[in-house]
Amino acid sequence: MLQLLTTIPALIGFVSACFASEVGVRELSVAQPGRDLTVTVWYPAGPGGKPTVVGDNKVFQGAAASVDAPVAPGRHPLVLLSHGSGSRVQAMGWLATQLAKAGFVVAGPNHPGTTSGFSTPAETPKLWQRTGDLSTIIDELAKNPAWSSVIDADRIGVVGFSLGGATAMELSGARANLEAYASYCDGYKKWDCAWFTSGTGYVNDEKVDVEKLDLRSIDRARFEQSNLDRRIKTAVLADPGLAQAYDAASLKQIAIPMHFINLGEGDTIPLAVISDRLAQLTPKGSYATVAGATHFSFLPECKEGAAELLKSFGEFDPICSDEASRPRAELHAELIGLVKDVLVRDLMVSGQ
């Protein structure tokens, strides 16, 4: 039965009790054949470490944390983060820090090929690479002596935004149909579909010309394979990509809670990410919308002058000039509440 994803008042006291006084942060290098990862880990910490601001740059406000602060005692649930196309995991720091304060270890990679400064249309649909990144992080943390005693391997969740939401869906057991995706893009010329035919990519932080991508040229077997990782116990999916391409039968077989969040309401939600039907198909699906938000509301707060700066770089997406009717900080507060409450319920209360 579809449940409405709402704040759970009974958990407020429980979450507050789990708050750490500090948020620690560390960066890990994880080796994979031909695909090395840079992974940021936020965690509940005690006093100490070197103060820093993760993700702070000329465009975005960062989030405060302490490098190498001591980890708070105990075994903590693990939450994996998967960023959107052309972004970085540090851009999810506004959420990660609050989850760390609530008692979670939060880890996410910069996915090669779909990260800011290194992003191309040809790499974007290869979700099997992104899911592999996340599964590799679980493997690495489980065998790393610095983390194996910190993380509770029986309590792992995933949070993804946009293409990261698609990654989280696949990691949870969803499978996409290549012909359905290609047919959708035949008639829809916005968002991801526009990116595939743009003839533009980014390599080494430089804008480059690339061939337009024919989705039907993708390795179909890899695109449609199952990327299920049974270690995942719950998923939060914010504006997940490929919304029109998932195989309904695969959604009906997903055994874990799937919490879908759309940014906006009604016809303001792009066809590319609308998720109410997906939530209805998953046995333990829930669905929420965030009124007054846009797709870009999940990004960090923008600094003064950021919109003009992005325009000077030739950035066409309204990253800092969107049409949200509420301040981004206010929207973030609502999103933090939605995400944190379901993760506490699924990984701390139910997981005890």
Image (cartoon, helix red, strand yellow):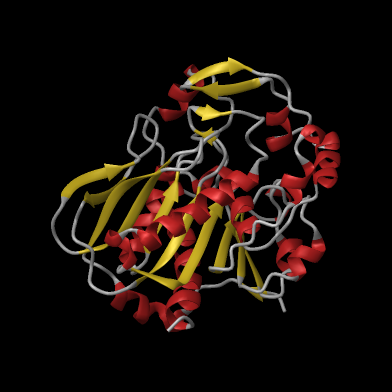
Residue sitting at the far front: 33
The residue at 61%/28% (across/down) is 120
- Looking at the image, residue 147 lies above or below residue 112: below
Count every numbered label the image shows and give the total: 0
Q: Is residue 318 above or below residue 92?
A: above
Residue 328 appears at what percent x and percent y?
Answer: 46, 48
**Can the viewer see residue 21 in this picture?**
yes
Q: Which of the 4 quarters of the picture holds residue 179?
A: top right
Which residue shows up at 61% across the image and 58% down it? 171
Between 29 and 181, the residue placed more toward the observer is: 29
Which quadrant does the C terminus fall into? bottom left
Question: Relative to 314, is 145 on the left or the right?
Answer: left
In the rendering, at what x and y percent does residue 23 appear?
26, 58
Residue 51 left/right relative to 193: left
Camera-nearest residue between 195 and 338? 195
x then y, percent, for residue 223: 73, 46
